Image (tube, helix red, strand yellow):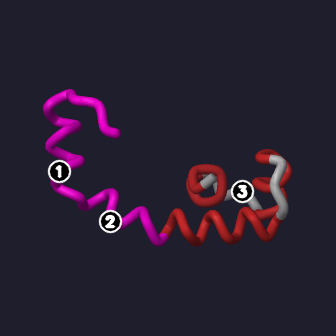
């Protein structure tokens, strides 16, 4: 959803239609995903796991 909304610059309506969700659901899920994203990008354990070639949970 984040990729559609922000990387591909899709509207809420287009994203909702593509994912068969309501516009409100797209807004809600996008907001929750964006709040979680910084912590996941900067978490050192995740990055070291990736560099070792191990799978993340």
Task: Give residue 2's position: percent from left, percent from top.
Answer: 58, 56
Q: Which residues are magenta?
A: 35-57
Q: Quadrant of residue 56?
A: top left
Task: Give residue 43's position: percent from left, percent from top.
Answer: 23, 58
- The quarter of the image holding the C terminus is top left
Magenta stretch: includes residue 24: no
Asked whether, in this view, residue 52 is left or right of residue 23, the answer is left
Kindly report the distance in space between the C-alpha atoms of the residues bearing marks 3 and 1.
Answer: 32 Å
Kindly report the distance in space between the C-alpha atoms of the residues bearing marks 1 and 2.
Answer: 11 Å
Q: Secondary structure at mark 1?
A: helix
Task: Give residue 10's position: percent from left, percent from top.
Answer: 72, 56
Q: Secondary structure at mark 3?
A: loop
Q: Nearer the viewer, residue 12 or 24?
A: 24
Q: Are marks 1 and 2 in contact (CB under 8 Å)?
A: no
Relative to 30, residue 52 above or below? above
Asked whether, in this view, residue 44 is left or right of residue 39, the answer is left
Q: Secondary structure at mark 2?
A: helix
The total number of labels drawn is 3
**Identity of the residue drawn at 32% across and 65% down:** 39
Q: Quadrant of residue 21?
A: bottom right
Numbered badge on residue 45: 1
**Identity of the residue drawn at 63% across and 52% down:** 1
Relative to 23, residue 1 above or below? above
Q: Mark 3, mark 1: which one is toward the viewer? A: 1
Numbered badge on residue 39: 2
Q: Are marks 3 and 1 in contact (CB under 8 Å)?
A: no
Circle 3 packing at 10 Å, graded few (<14), some (14-19), many (20+), is: some
**Identity of the residue drawn at 19% across and 39% down:** 49
Q: Which residue is mark 3?
A: 10
């Amino acid at each position: 959803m984040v990729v559609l909304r922000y990387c591909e610059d899709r509207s809420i309506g287009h994203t909702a239609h593509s994912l068969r969700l309501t516009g409100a659901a797209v807004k809600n899920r996008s907001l929750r995903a964006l709040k979680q994203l910084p912590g996941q990008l900067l978490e050192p354990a995740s990055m070291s796991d990736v560099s070792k070639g191990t799978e993340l949970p």
